[in-house]
Amino acid sequence: MKDRITLTGLTARGRHGVMPEERRNGQDFVVDVALHVDVATAAATDDIADTVHYGLLARAVLDVVEGEPCDLIETLAERIAEVCLAPPLVQAADVTVHKPQAPVGVPFTDVSVRVSRSARRSRQAVLALGANLGDRAATLQGAVRALAAQPQLRVVDVSAVYESDPVGGPEQPPYLNAVVLAETTLAPEALLAAAHRVEAAYGRVRDVRWGARTLDVDLISLGDVTRSTPRLQLPHPRAQDRAFVLVPWLDVDPDASLAGHGRVGELLRGADVAGVRRADQISLEVP
Ligand code: PH2
Ligand code: MG
Ligand code: MG
């Protein structure tokens, strides 16, 4: 996406700087911004609601310049980038802050800092937990807590717990399964890494495929992300066939749907759910 909306030479007085006289007297700061916005829709509809109103954005940028003083133009640029990324249509922003009257002590024309920042939109993550070794209930609760403690991830809800007959793999004990709904700004690979960290905290070793495990944390879906790499497939390629995922998922989100397969409630109509039994004596807390 190469479309840009740029504002150049936005100027206001601010009191940013390390020197006491900069704080006292203030000086001009000049800001250039380039907003990465797909303007095709607005071009077709000719409607301001389909793009970013640059007048409003310009005012918001200068409010930052005139606002709370900071020492560094790096800090100022970062604050301005945050304001630029606030409108939902902005995918990324390049912000340059110039300080042409900076007390540099030698003749000069300008000093500037430029930052480029991408919007980090929050997405819903659906994670399936499974445990069939050790204190399974304690492990699941610990896993939910450990997920909630991951940076940039908020646990929103947790399903009821289900006991399920093992599907596939060698002979092994029954599982406890549950599904966690979360909101996260993590990229897919970073979310996978977080899931692996939580598994590792419970002594998970990766040896026998589909074998018994203290804890399994599977990524079922992440917003509308699709991925097909050797390490990560999204949505999960087998979720649609797994009653031990679909039953708890429907429990925690009756409107759930799995991209490419439709509503979870519908998927379960034809599914064999006999092997998945609600474990009413166990319930998991949302931290
Ligand atoms: N996980 C597997 C393989 N088989 N069976 C049940 N019932 N529950 C699971 O979580 C499970 C499984 C591989 O991750
Ligand atoms: Mg797994
Ligand atoms: Mg699994």
Image: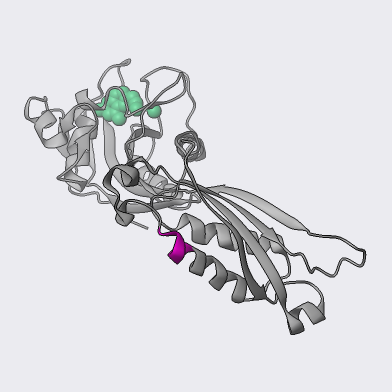
| Percent x, y of residue 48 | 33, 56
**Near-viewer residue (31 or 75):** 31
Res 212 quadrant in image: top left
Could you tell me what secondary structure mostly forms the magenta stretch?
A: helix
Residue at the far right in the pictured view: 106
| Percent x, y of residue 218 | 37, 32
Magenta stretch: residue 54 in it? Answer: yes
Q: Which residue does the image show at 67% across and 52% down from the upper left?
A: 114
User: What's the coloring here?
Assistant: one colour
| Percent x, y of residue 68 | 61, 76
**Near-viewer residue (177 or 256):** 256
Locate residue 268 relative to residue 160 in the image: left or right. Answer: left
Position of the C terminus, as image quadrant, is: bottom left
Locate residue 257 relative to residue 3 in the image: left or right. Answer: left
Residue at the far top in the pictured view: 170
Residue at the far left in the pictured view: 269
Q: In what quadrant does ligand 1 lie?
A: top left
- Magenta range is 53-57
Q: Which residue does the image show at 68% across and 71% down from the upper left?
A: 70
| Percent x, y of residue 31 | 63, 61
Classify 263 as above or below 210.
below
**Near-viewer residue (156 or 108):** 108
Magenta stretch: residue 11 in it? Answer: no
